[in-house]
Image (cartoon, rainbow, N blue to C red):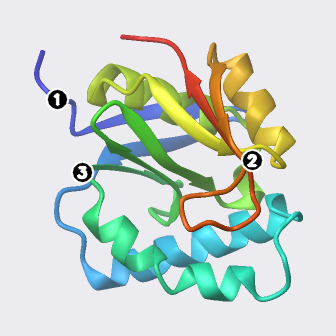
């Protein structure tokens, strides 16, 4: 089936958003998405050590720019409020502006990734219990665990397999 370039979704509180596949990753968009990343991490990753957010943030623009498939959610004012990146079958990143969390956007973005990108795996920080619970609710289950993240920091990673399109 052909790749859908965008979909319009209706979320709670009578709002609509657009989820769009982004091919051309302009520096302005990467800058806005990096801010979405930071706001999301500060709201959900309270287990990080002081200074970690600033250190990790240095690599975020490169990660967003280099990910194989990128979907961005835009609000009614056409402002990016979330993004999801997929490499192969792996969802490598899903971050939402804290103001839009809990409205069904994460679920819609996951559905988009499964249906349009063939995503069926995800990794999550073990200490991020909210994200782990979200992915389990979406049908994913833990199949492996490491004691550290990919950079060797003391943040255990859960490898999860899940739903397929």
Q: Nearer the viewer, mark 1 or mark 3?
A: 3
Disc 1/disc 2 C-alpha distance (Å): 26 Å
Instruction: Tell me where residue 147 appears, x and y as whole percent.
Output: 72, 49
Q: Is residue 31 left or right of residue 161?
A: left
**Badge number at residue 68:** 3
Q: Nearer the viewer, mark 2 or mark 3?
A: 3
Instruction: Tell me where residue 152 appears, x and y as whole percent.
Output: 62, 66
In this view, 153 is above or below 51: above
Q: Residue at the spot x=49%, y=66% of the render?
A: 79
- Is residue 49 or residue 71 the one in the foreground? 49
Crowd around label 3: few <14 · some 14–19 · many ≥20 (10 Å) = some
Which residue in the protein does label 2 denote?
101
Q: Do the residues under discs 1 and 2 have CB atoms within 8 angstroms?
A: no
**Badge number at residue 3:** 1
**Badge number at residue 74:** none
Would residue 66 be visible to someone looking at this image? yes
Q: Residue at the spot x=47%, y=75% of the render?
A: 60
Of pointers 1 and 3, the one earlier in the residue sequence:
1
Crowd around label 1: few <14 · some 14–19 · many ≥20 (10 Å) = few
Disc 1/disc 3 C-alpha distance (Å): 14 Å
**For the residue labelled by badge 1, is the local secondary structure a helix, a strand or a loop?**
loop
In this view, 61 is above or below 54: above
Of pointers 2 and 3, the one earlier in the residue sequence:
3
In this view, 14 is above or below 52: above
In this view, 50 is above or below 63: below
Q: Residue at the spot x=51%, y=44% of the render?
A: 17
**For the residue labelled by badge 3, is the local secondary structure a helix, a strand or a loop?**
loop
Of pointers 1 and 2, the one earlier in the residue sequence:
1
């Amino acid at each position: 089936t052909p790749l859908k370039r965008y979909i319009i979704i209706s979320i709670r509180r009578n709002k609509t958003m657009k989820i769009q596949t982004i091919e051309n990753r302009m520096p302005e968009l990467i800058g806005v998405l990096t801010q979405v990343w930071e706001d999301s991490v500060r709201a959900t990753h309270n287990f990080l050590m002081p200074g970690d957010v600033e250190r990790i943030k240095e690599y975020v623009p490169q990660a967003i720019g280099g990910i194989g498939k990128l979907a961005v959610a835009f609000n009614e004012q056409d402002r990016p409020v979330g993004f999801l990146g997929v490499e192969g079958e792996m969802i490598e990143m899903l971050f939402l502006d804290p103001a839009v969390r809990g409205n069904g956007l994460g679920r819609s973005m996951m559905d988009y990734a499964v249906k349009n990108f063939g995503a069926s795996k995800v990794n999550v920080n073990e200490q991020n219990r909210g994200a782990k619970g979200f992915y389990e609710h979406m049908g994913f289950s833990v199949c492996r665990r490491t004691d550290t993240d990919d950079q060797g920091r003391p943040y255990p990673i859960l490898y999860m397999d899940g739903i397929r399109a």
